[in-house]
Image (cartoon, grey):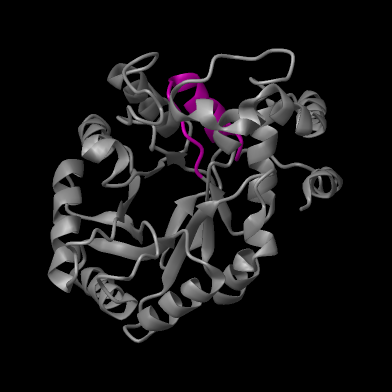
Amino acid sequence: MTTPQVSVGNISLPAIGIGTWSWGDRLFWDYGSDYDAADVEKAFQAAVENGATFFDTAEVYGLGESEKLIGRFLKQTDAPVQIATKYFPLPWRFNKQAVSDALTASLERLQVEQIALYQVHTPFSFFMSQSTLMEALASEVKRGRILSVGVSNYSAEQMQQAHSLLAKYEVPLAVNQVRYSLITRQIESKGILDAARQLGITILAYSPLAQGLLTGKYTPDNSQPIQGARKLDRRFSSSGLKKIEPVLTLLRQLGEKYDKTPAQVALNWLIAQGDVIPIPGAKNPKQAKDNAEAATWQLSDEDVRQLDSMTSP
């Protein structure tokens, strides 16, 4: 089956993408220990072969290493691949030229002249106003180096402001990239999801598998070794896993019903929300293939409601 497409601002993206935070990141993900460049290259190839041709990165992922890896991989495929990356509002970036320079550096690492989506990594506006930032991003759309503009981790109010500022230049705000999964649903309670729908903004859901908690790999009785900074996350403790055991049980049951993995069920639930594109990570080709296949089938309305009711805040 082919991967469905989603209209996002003035572009079209696959219904599922691949997040590449772990590609080159040693601090959080322990890159270089149990997986390396060869593994993520195979993950890239498997994702593309299975229709997940949209990759989300950032200049700070692996301090630029994620972008460099993707740039290398892009040279080895003829498939139409779409790339999103992110600008980080660092203290010494306080004018439009700083945005242009940051984008130039990202494009050079990616070895491309244009990307599908450029996002603001966080709504920090102490050194540069949102007005100046959005004007700079709109200028890059007009210049043709980016096709669309997004934000990340913006509240409903901040998203509304960014949307209004961009509208002055007739540039739509395409996405808000936020944490969203079955067990992290704060964007619903905080009004972000409703506001995005009203404004026609797509949600890019990062950590859609709660950094692995929803894969079924970790259970109270089967404590897998945790790498990197996740060791400090209490949700991975035995008591934390016991709290979500009913959710994991339901994911396993639905997985058996559809002949899918618990992770594919969790990702499909997000896609079923409408105008939500999950961007799970993938450290190897099997994870990339499984992620891509999560968009090629559909949970029934009743199963979506069952997952909703079990995990509602």
State left or right for residue 158 relative to residue 261: left
Q: How many marks?
A: 0
Instruction: Where is residue 201? Give x, y as percent.
Output: 52, 68
Picture quadrant where residue 47 is located: top left
| Residue name at image x 76 percent, y 29 percent | 248
**254 in magenta:** no
Residue 118 lies, with reference to residue 42, above or below; the image says: below
| Residue name at image x 22 percent, y 61 percent | 91
Instruction: Where is residue 121? Give x, y as percent.
Output: 36, 56
Picture quadrant where residue 174 is located: bottom left
Towards the viewer: 114 or 67: 67
Picture quadrant where residue 73 is located: top left
Towards the viewer: 231 or 313: 231
Instruction: Where is residue 30? Give x, y as percent.
Output: 37, 23
State left or right for residue 20 relative to residue 198: left
Residue 109 lies, with reference to residue 177, above or below; the image says: above
Towards the viewer: 17 or 213: 213
Assign the N terminus to one quadrant of the image: top right
Instruction: Where is residue 217? Give x, y as percent.
Output: 64, 20
What range of the chain is rendered magenta?
279-295
State left or right for residue 166 relative to residue 110: right
Residue 26 visible in the shown view: yes
